[in-house]
Amino acid sequence: MSDNPDLKQRLLSEFSHRELSLNGTRETPLNILRRESMQRFQELGFPTIRNEEWKYANIMSAIALPFALGSGMTSSITPEDINPFTIQGIDAHILVFVNGIYAPKLSNIHTLHDDVSIGNIATILQESPDSLTEHFTQEAAKNEAFTALNAALTHDGAFISIPNGAILDKPIHVMMITDSSTSPVMVHPLHIISCGRSSSATIIHSAHTVGTNAGFTNSVVNITVGENANLRQYIIQNDCDTAYSVQSTFVKQERDSTYSAVTVSLGGAFIRNNHSSVLGGENSVANYYGLVLGSKRQLIDNHTLADHATPHCQSNELYKYILDERSTGVFNGKIIVREDAQKTNAYQSNKTILLSDTATINTKPQLEIFADDVKCSHGATSGQLDEEALFYMRSRGISAEKARALLLHAFAADVLEKISIAPLRTTLDHIIAERLHDNEEDVFASAA
């Protein structure tokens, strides 16, 4: 692989300078892991389009920018600055991180049930440096440069632990703020989420950039869903045109568990989502839903993996793309059914509407099946809006723009309806209406 030697060398140099502050003075398993991860990043370099997994996602223009590590920068972000990023009408625990560092004065954690823990990783590492070593994704870091870089350089992130039997009545909103007011900033947050046996929780993730310079968020989310637990995760990506992100989410599921993720990608110059689940216990269910609205020169890439490691499990994937102007969409969905994973049900679908002749979709469904008693299906379609449906609506007195918006909302509705939090769903409806240049606020209400 070739890569940008300037950024790579600066990251290696900054790791060397900051290793003491990241790891402390004594030799620990975490220290060793960080050094091994940085060495692995040095060997791999930044991925290029010659890497099959990055064939359609050229990251070179992003890493050519003069990023500095955000954890070493100060910020003057105020509550007023983050108000536009809050979701109106939701009573939630809010964890705010600015340039990758927890900001307690901007956060709001309500009274919690006994043994529920909502906090940040840096505090835990300070008190017990090796307690989280197993969550630094050693295996994933072996072949993925950005994951290795995160393991080496992460300083902070959300730590959420839901004990056995706990049912959280409020969602948790993890808000990542990149302050690029003075220079381009790169941050490497690590979020750890653990759901105990028979627990239930809802997590919202969002990332936002404040400032005119570029921001790059390289985040890793490690999730464990215990036996009979239910976790819902909503990932909202609606950042500015100077925002770049790589988010890698690794989920381990135990028997009878359900994990459901909805990823809505609306804004950002470059978005790469790596999302994988290991269905490691019988009767576990993984649901992946995604909605992409691309415009300008955006590149939005979703890579998913449903790894069926045990029998009687089910995975469902539905990703829908609406691409306009010169935007590029990528979908790579992989399903693995292990030899012992009999009675597997796995479904995958990617559907795309191209609104311009210059928009592009690259889709690659993959099946690796090593068991014989399974039901697996995948499909991918792409096309334009139904001209007959548009003509029919126009003949009923509906304007061309509103008819277009209604059809696009109908296309997106079966993803948005997977969001169980009504205020969040309404907020996204309004954002999408604005993106579709519809000025009538009742468009989506009338289509619902």
Image: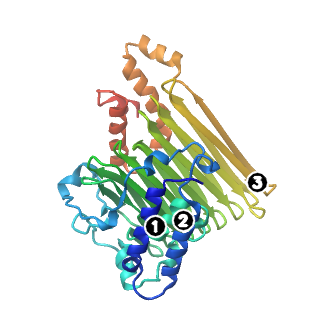
- Reply above or below: 132 against 391: below
Q: Which residue is mark 1?
A: 12
Which element is circle 1 on?
helix
Q: Amino acid at mark 1?
A: Leu
- Reply above or below: 117 against 443: below
Q: Which residue is mark 3?
A: 369
- Which mark's residue is nearer the viewer, 2 or 3? 2
- Which mark's residue is nearer the viewer, 1 or 3? 1
Identify the colour scheme used: rainbow
Q: Earlier in the sequence, mark 2 or mark 3?
A: 2
Is residue 63 shown to the viewer in this render? yes
Which element is circle 2 on?
helix
Q: Which residue is mark 2?
A: 42
On the rendered structure, is 57 left or right of 407? right
Quadrant of res 257: bottom right
Residue 217 position in % (x across, y down) = 40, 56
Give 252 or 81, whichever is nearer the viewer: 81
Q: Residue at x 60, y 45 (%)?
A: 55
Q: Which mark is residue 67?
A: none
Give 414 or 140, whichever is nearer the viewer: 140
Q: Amino acid at mark 2?
A: Gln
- Reply above or below: 440 against 294: above
In the picture as drawn, the residue positioned furthest to the bottom comes out as 26
Residue 115 position in % (x across, y down) = 39, 79
Residue 29 position in % (x across, y down) = 52, 83
Q: Amino acid at mark 3?
A: Ile
Q: Earlier in the sequence, mark 2 or mark 1?
A: 1
Give 212 or 294, whichever is nearer the viewer: 212
Circles 2 and 3: CB atoms closer than 8 Å: no
Marks 2 and 3, how far apart in space?
34 Å
Please rate how many residues cluster around mark 2, counting C-alpha atoms within 10 Å: few if below 14, some from 14 to 19, many from 20: some
Which element is circle 3 on?
strand
